[in-house]
């Protein structure tokens, strides 16, 4: 029975972590984008507008949970959770500290790339059940993009698994040496770009482009269900950044205890900020351009990285 | 028979798997069918996880839920123009398929009689390493041949799909 209780506690803690991370992430994104556009961003509520997103969340929770009349009701109500849950689950294999990972499994890296792929189903369902053309097209585009970028992302993670000789994220982090970062720089770039694309974030946000598809697959959502879509985007952002920091950049390795945790947080924050800078700097990719990028540029790059690692490996 | 935690989880997962499998067969709305299939695949992955076969469970989620089911959903969304209403629940094919299912059930029950008690423990955590040692060691030739076959199939698909352009 302790297993059930422990699992429930972990689940609640994970949900809380994602909620706080999403709150902070939205605030940080608004600040970063404001600086890029020579504005100040939120300033009124709390120090430097820190509680602005909390106020927004309270507003969203209090809003009426509208289900339009023409939608496929059960599927429509289920879809946001189907997007959110796998992304929340993927947090469980990330080593947040030197010797600690919530779930220490020998297939952790496979788990991290496999489980979020379930949320593609949620995206398709959201688009389908809304029953309008914008949402259906957005859902199809979003899903096509997500499964295309899964391949280079998996290959880039595979390069690290090959180098470390393990699929457990904690093992990979513990075996990290400083020259890994220059040797696997291509993999880091491929991972970075395909993570952005996998989250449907700008400049790869054509599936939810405001000007064309209103909001893509979640055009018909409002209130808390809309917020769950946004939360899964920021939860995915945090998960991808922490995983990247742990796998490609050595994570918390080298510093003991709390300092290690601070180190991995700093590295992840660098990745998060970079992703935001990319989003607010580059223009949006067209649908065909981003599929070309996935199949003709990123996948070959990831394969080249695999070859490089394969050449290095016998000399170690 | 003792009701410890793994047994209870197994019963729950088995019930979910059975119910979702029945959904796939009995529901006549194709999107619900696909979702039932997804739930079924996930509960089977859960059963794998329960027995410690974590690699198998993760692969099941990756390949079947994240790959095959998504492709099926794609096909459904691209093909289905309008919901054609509920089809009849009983058709003349049902007798044939029911007898096939019954025959399969009897066959599996007979075949698995001896082994049913063997899978009560859990696989060792190093199961993946053993698997890779088998695949990359003794079974290397078969593994490579299977890979070659899949590559040929992949090339064939590209040739067929791009054949019109010339």
Image (cartoon, rainbow, N blue to C red):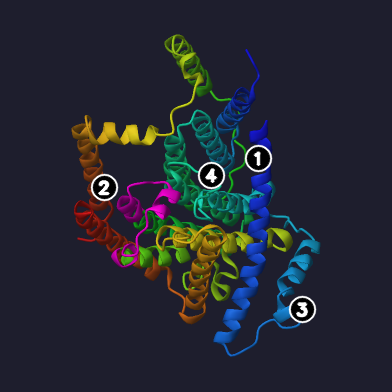
Q: Earlier in the sequence, mark 4 or mark 1?
A: 1
Is residue B100 placed above or below A156 in the rendered structure? Answer: above
Residue A208 in the image: x percent, y percent?
Answer: 55, 67
Cα separation, mark 4 vs mark 3, equals: 38 Å
Q: Chain of mark 2?
A: B
Q: Nearer the viewer, residue A44 or A180?
A: A180
Name the residue at 23% across, 60% down.
A308
Q: CA distance from mark 4 to mark 1?
A: 12 Å
B70 in the magenta segment? no
Instruction: Let me know if residue A182 is in the magenta part.
Output: yes
Decide which of B88, A258 is in the foreground and name it: A258
Mark 1 Cα-neighbour bin, 10 Å: few <14, some 14–19, many ≥20: few
Residue indicated by mark 4? A103
Q: Give the left or right position of residue B76, taking residue A181 as reference.
A: right
Badge 3 is on which residue?
Answer: A45
- Magenta stretch: give its range: A158-183
Position above or below: A75 against B123:
below
Quadrant position of residue B151: top left
- Which of pointers 4 and 2 indicates the residue nearer the eye? 4
Circle 3 marks a residue in which chain? A
Distance of label 3 from label 1 (alpha carbons): 36 Å
- The quarter of the rendered structure image containing the N terminus of chain A is top right
Where residue A21 appears, x then y in whole percent? 63, 63
Q: Closer to the N terminus: mark 4 or mark 3? A: 3
Q: Position of residue B18 (x, y in %)?
A: 58, 26
- Disc 4, SS: loop
Mark 2–mark 3 Cα distance, whole angstroms, equals: 57 Å
Q: Which residue is mark 2?
A: B154
């Amino acid at each position: 029975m302790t297993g059930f209780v422990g699992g429930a506690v972990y689940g609640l803690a994970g949900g809380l972590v994602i909620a706080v991370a999403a709150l902070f992430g939205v605030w940080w994104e608004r600040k970063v984008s404001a600086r890029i556009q020579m504005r100040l961003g939120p300033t009124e509520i709390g120090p430097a507008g820190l509680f602005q997103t909390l106020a927004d969340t309270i507003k969203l929770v209090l809003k009426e949970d509208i289900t339009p009349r023409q939608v496929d009701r059960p599927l429509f109500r289920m879809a946001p959770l189907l997007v959110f849950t796998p992304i929340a689950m993927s947090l469980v294999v990330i080593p947040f500290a030197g010797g600690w990972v919530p779930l220490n499994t020998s297939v952790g890296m496979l788990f991290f790339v496999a489980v979020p792929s379930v949320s593609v189903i949620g995206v398709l369902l959201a688009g389908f059940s809304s029953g309008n053309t914008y949402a259906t097209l957005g859902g199809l585009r979003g899903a096509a993009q997500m499964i295309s970028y899964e391949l280079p992302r998996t290959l880039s993670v595979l390069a690290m698994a090959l180098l470390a000789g393990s699929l457990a994220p904690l093992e990979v982090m513990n075996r990290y040496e400083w020259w890994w970062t220059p040797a696997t720089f291509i993999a880091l770039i491929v991972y970075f770009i395909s993570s952005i694309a996998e989250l449907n974030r700008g400049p790869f946000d054509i599936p939810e482009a405001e000007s064309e598809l209103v909001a893509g697959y979640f055009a018909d959502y409002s209130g808390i269900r809309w917020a769950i879509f946004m939360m899964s985007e920021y939860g995915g952002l945090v998960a991808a950044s922490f995983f990247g920091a742990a796998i490609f950049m050595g994570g918390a390795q080298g510093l003991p205890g709390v300092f290690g945790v601070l180190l991995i947080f700093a590295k992840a924050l660098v990745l998060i900020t970079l992703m935001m800078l990319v989003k607010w700097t580059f223009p949006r990719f067209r649908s065909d351009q981003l599929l070309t990028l996935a199949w003709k540029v990123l996948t070959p790059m990831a394969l080249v990285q695999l070859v490089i690692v394969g050449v290095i490996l016998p000399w170690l | 028979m003792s009701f410890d935690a793994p047994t209870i989880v197994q019963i729950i997962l088995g019930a979910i798997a059975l119910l979702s499998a029945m959904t796939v067969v009995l529901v006549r709305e194709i999107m619900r069918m696909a979702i039932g299939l997804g739930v079924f695949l996930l509960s089977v992955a859960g059963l794998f996880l329960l027995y410690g076969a974590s690699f198998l469970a993760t692969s099941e989620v990756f390949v079947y839920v994240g790959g095959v089911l998504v492709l099926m959903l794609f096909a459904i969304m691209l093909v289905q123009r309008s919901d054609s209403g509920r089809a009849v629940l009983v058709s003349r094919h049902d007798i044939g398929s029911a007898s096939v299912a019954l025959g399969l059930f009897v066959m599996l029950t007979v075949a698995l009689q001896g082994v049913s008690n063997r899978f009560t423990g859990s696989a060792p955590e190093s199961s993946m390493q053993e698997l890779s040692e088998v695949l990359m060691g003794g079974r290397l030739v078969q593994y490579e041949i299977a890979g070659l076959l899949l590559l040929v199939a992949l090339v064939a698909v590209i040739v067929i799909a791009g054949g019109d352009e010339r």
